[in-house]
């Protein structure tokens, strides 16, 4: 349900913009309002799960998600919509690390754990794919508001079933553990200010007070986060956690991966509806091959990782996904779906899917039961931060390039399309850079290695 809502809104964005009166750069807050809160608070959410129980946090997150979905569905102004999306982001920050952390504890056999992580990644892909289809169907046949209202009965069902199926798990000595709320506030505030400044640059000069102050405030708050984490007794992000080179690299390259991925889905949806004239339903169905391609890629990645290693699979996936984005960057106003969109989508989806099991395995490399929530929280945080920053940067680049083309006398639809194409090329470059960093910096990771998390399950329980 949570991952579905990351994509279900994309197909409805043009209708939401029209109904509530969003500006082009303001529309990005429908996505960024979600990912900023999720990314900024995921680490705190992971630690809350370690201390107070992962099942409890998962249930709390589901309740909050249902309430926030109702706010989004009832929105009558941009501010109300963004507020609801902020609430949904907080809900993911609470629930997502709890779900992934429980997988690390429940599956004790390394091979079974690898399969479970692959299945978890597959459900992510399935939720993302269904989001496009559900969003298109509901927006076309009913109203975009139902893409949010539909979460409420799903949440009620999960709340009824989950306590019967999953036991509670938490750290052994919660009385010795403190929560770094200050660090969470500083990091979230820094990300918010940084993204706000980048998006403001789409409508204002880079040297304007609004842009400069926001960027300076963001950088300052993020810098203070490092100092806070260095000094507090129980830091939200223990700096020693990044001593493991493989975990550090995979989390860093997640910024590139999600920057390209989210920007691709956001802008290609707008291109299909605003330039090619697709209906929401047609646009939603057009994303169906991406879900199949990602599912196939996950299967290939899960099978290939034990044989070829995490480094080879992850690096190949990044570079191949970059090639898919490069294919997509050839779009123009006369692009047809079979020849201009579908080939790049399939290539991108298969290679992106192949990276998911390997990247998740690397992100949990060498963690203990005590830090399983932290490890999953860091991975999800990097993905959400990458989504927010990537969307802010690439949308700003696309808008500015479009304005430049308009000043040269290029027709509006052609100018908008060139902006999207430039963003896709930048996304492709980020993917290739990520793959090269993995090749150069990854340690050797054995996917069937001894699992320190599983070995301490009995003690934890």
Image (tube, rainbow, N blue to C red):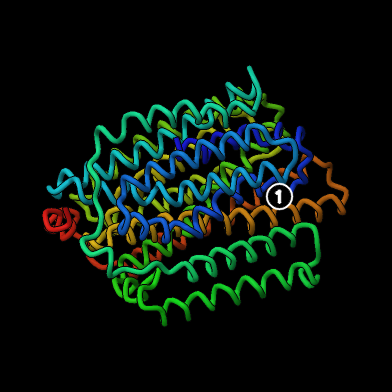
Residue 409, how many percent across, how many down? 88, 48
Residue 260, how many percent across, how many down? 53, 52
Mark 1 closeness class: few <14, some 14–19, many ≥20 residues within 10 Å: many
Residue 418, how many percent across, how many down? 71, 47
Q: Quadrant of residue 359?
A: bottom left
Question: Residue 90 versus residue 431: which sits nearer the camera?
Answer: 90
Residue 398 seen in the current view: yes
Q: Secondary structure at mark 1?
A: helix
Q: Quadrant of residue 416?
A: top right
Say which residue appears at 65% left-offset and 65% top-offset.
193
Residue 399, how many percent across, how many down? 74, 52
Question: Residue 46 versus residue 140: which sits nearer the camera?
Answer: 46
Rendered view: 107 above or below 203: above
Rendered view: 84 above or below 240: above
Rendered view: 102 above or below 336: below
243 left or right of 417 in image: left
The N terminus: image quadrant: top left
Q: Which residue bears the numbered disc 1? A: 419
Q: Quadrant of residue 282?
A: top right
Say which residue appears at 68% left-offset and 62% top-offset.
198
Q: How many marks?
A: 1
Residue 366 seen in the current view: no
Question: Residue 460 versus residue 212: which sits nearer the camera?
Answer: 460
Which residue of the protein is positioned furthest toward the front in this rendering?
175
Question: Residue 86 versus residue 255: which sits nearer the camera?
Answer: 86
368 left or right of 298 in image: left
Say which residue appears at 54% left-offset and 70% top-offset.
186
Which residue of the protein is positioned furthest toward the top in this rendering?
141
């Amino acid at each position: 349900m949570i991952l579905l809502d990351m994509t279900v809104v994309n197909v409805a964005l043009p209708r939401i913009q029209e109904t509530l009166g969003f500006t082009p750069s303001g529309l990005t807050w429908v996505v960024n309002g979600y990912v900023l809160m999720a990314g900024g608070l995921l680490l705190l959410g992971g630690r809350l799960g370690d201390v107070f129980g992962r099942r409890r946090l998962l249930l709390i997150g589901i309740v909050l998600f249902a309430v926030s979905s109702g706010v989004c569905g009832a929105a009558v102004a941009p501010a109300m919509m963004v507020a609801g999306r902020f609430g949904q982001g907080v809900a993911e920050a609470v629930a997502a690390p709890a779900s992934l952390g429980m997988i690390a504890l429940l599956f004790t056999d390394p091979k079974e754990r690898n399969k479970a992580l692959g299945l978890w990644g597959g459900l992510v892909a399935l939720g993302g794919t269904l989001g496009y289809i559900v969003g298109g169907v509901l927006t076309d046949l009913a109203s975009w508001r139902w893409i949010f209202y539909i979460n409420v009965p799903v949440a009620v069902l999960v709340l009824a079933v989950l306590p019967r199926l999953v036991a509670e798990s938490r750290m052994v000595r919660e009385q010795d553990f403190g929560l770094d709320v200050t660090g969470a506030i500083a990091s979230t505030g820094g990300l918010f200010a940084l993204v706000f400044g980048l998006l403001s640059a789409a409508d204002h000069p880079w040297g304007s007070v609004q842009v400069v102050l926001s960027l300076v405030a963001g950088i300052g708050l993020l810098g203070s986060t490092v100092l806070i984490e260095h000094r507090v007794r129980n830091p939200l992000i223990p700096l020693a956690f990044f001593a493991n080179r493989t975990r550090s690299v995979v989390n860093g390259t997640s910024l590139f991966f999600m920057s390209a991925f989210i920007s691709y889905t956001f802008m290609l949806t707008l291109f299909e509806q605003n330039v090619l004239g697709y209906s929401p339903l047609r646009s939603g169905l057009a994303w169906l091959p991406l879900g199949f391609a990602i599912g196939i890629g996950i299967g290939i990645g899960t099978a290939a990782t034990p044989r070829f290693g995490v480094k080879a699979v992850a690096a190949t996936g990044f570079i191949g996904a970059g090639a898919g984005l490069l294919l997509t960057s050839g779009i123009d106003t006369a692009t047809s779906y079979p020849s201009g969109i579908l080939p790049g989508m399939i290539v991108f989806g298969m290679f992106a899917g192949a990276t998911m099991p390997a990247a998740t395995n690397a992100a949990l490399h060498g963690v203990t039961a005590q830090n399983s929530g932290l490890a999953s929280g860091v991975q999800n945080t990097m993905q959400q931060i990458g989504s927010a920053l990537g969307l802010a940067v690439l949308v700003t680049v696309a808008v500015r390039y479009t304005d430049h083309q308009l000043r040269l006398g290029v027709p509006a639809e052609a100018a908008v399309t060139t902006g999207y194409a430039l963003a896709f090329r930048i996304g492709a470059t980020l993917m290739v850079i990520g793959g090269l960093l993995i090749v150069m910096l990854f340690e050797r990771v054995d996917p069937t290695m001894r699992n320190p998390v599983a070995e301490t399950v009995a003690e934890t329980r």
